[in-house]
Amino acid sequence: MAVYHCSLCRRTSFTGRRHLYSASHRRRLQEALGRLEEEVAAARAAMDGAAVRRYDPAEHERRVWCLCCGRGVRRDGRSGALALPHAGLLQHLAGAEHRRETARFWRENRADAALRERFVVAAEEYARFVAALEKAVGAHEEREEENIRQMAARIREAERRQRDTVRAALEVGAAELSRIQRCCAEHRERRGWDGDGGGRRAALSTRNLVAFS
């Protein structure tokens, strides 16, 4: 009696490799490939319009289970503070190791050979995607630099306006202070003149009184 352990079904079969042709194995294989194919289709769609996003760990640290290689693969790539949607998975699908493991998985599980190419990415396709992604990153950096320049210009303009406002306020204050000082000086002059006149009148009155007596 042949014993065969199926890693996909996670069970040991005592019918040998005939298990691979059983309905339960075929159903499990179809379900597993269906889940992976959805991820691969989404990644392929991203190749038509390479884009970048602001990196968010909660969103861009997600991993995709590669059934063929038996390990998790980071779905998105990263460039500094930018996330590169689906770039990680596409890099994996285009790698030589994944292509070898996909061929092995197909042989071991008796998968439909006509479907295998759906789960790999040609090197030429991936190279075009990388070139488009580099352009997208460059365009984003140019936009960020332009935004920084515009922000710096707005800050300089705001500072200039603030300086002008302060200078105008100081000039108004200086003019008002000068006016007040002139008024005070004129007031002191008037008080000084009235004081001298009163003294002279008092002296004249005293002399008159002396003469009369």
Image (cartoon, grey):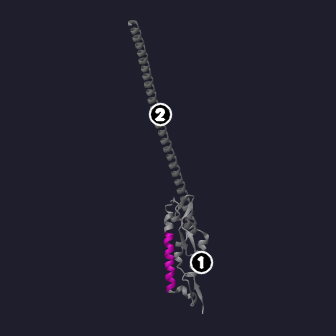
Residue at position x 44%, y 22% in the image: 188
Q: Nearer the viewer, residue 106 or 196?
A: 196
> Per the image, is 24 magenta?
yes
Q: Secondary structure at mark 1?
A: helix
Mark 2 neighbour class, 10 Å CA radius: few under 14, some 14 to 19, many 20 or more: few
Residue at position x 59%, y 78% in the image: 104
The quarter of the picture where the C terminus appears is top left
Furthest-front residue in view? 213
Q: Is 206 placed left or right of 92 in the picture?
A: left
Which dot marks residue 104?
A: 1
Q: How many discs appear?
A: 2
Which dot marks residue 144?
A: none
Q: Amino acid at mark 1?
A: Arg
Q: CA distance from mark 2 to mark 1?
A: 83 Å
Q: Is residue 32 above or below residue 138?
A: below
The quarter of the picture where the N terminus appears is bottom right
Looking at the rendered image, the disc whose residue lies closer to the viewer, 2 or 1, is: 2
Q: Secondary structure at mark 2?
A: helix
> Which residue is label 2 attached to?
170
Q: Magenta stretch?
A: 23-41
Furthest-bottom residue in view? 1
Tag 2–tag 1 contact (CB < 8 Å): no
Q: Amino acid at mark 2?
A: Leu
Labels 2 and 1: the sequence-earlier one: 1
Magenta segment main secondary structure: helix
Residue 195 placed where, x, y %?
A: 43, 18
Q: Is residue 134 above or below residue 106?
A: above
Residue 84 placed where, x, y %?
A: 53, 61
> Per the image, is 212 magenta?
no
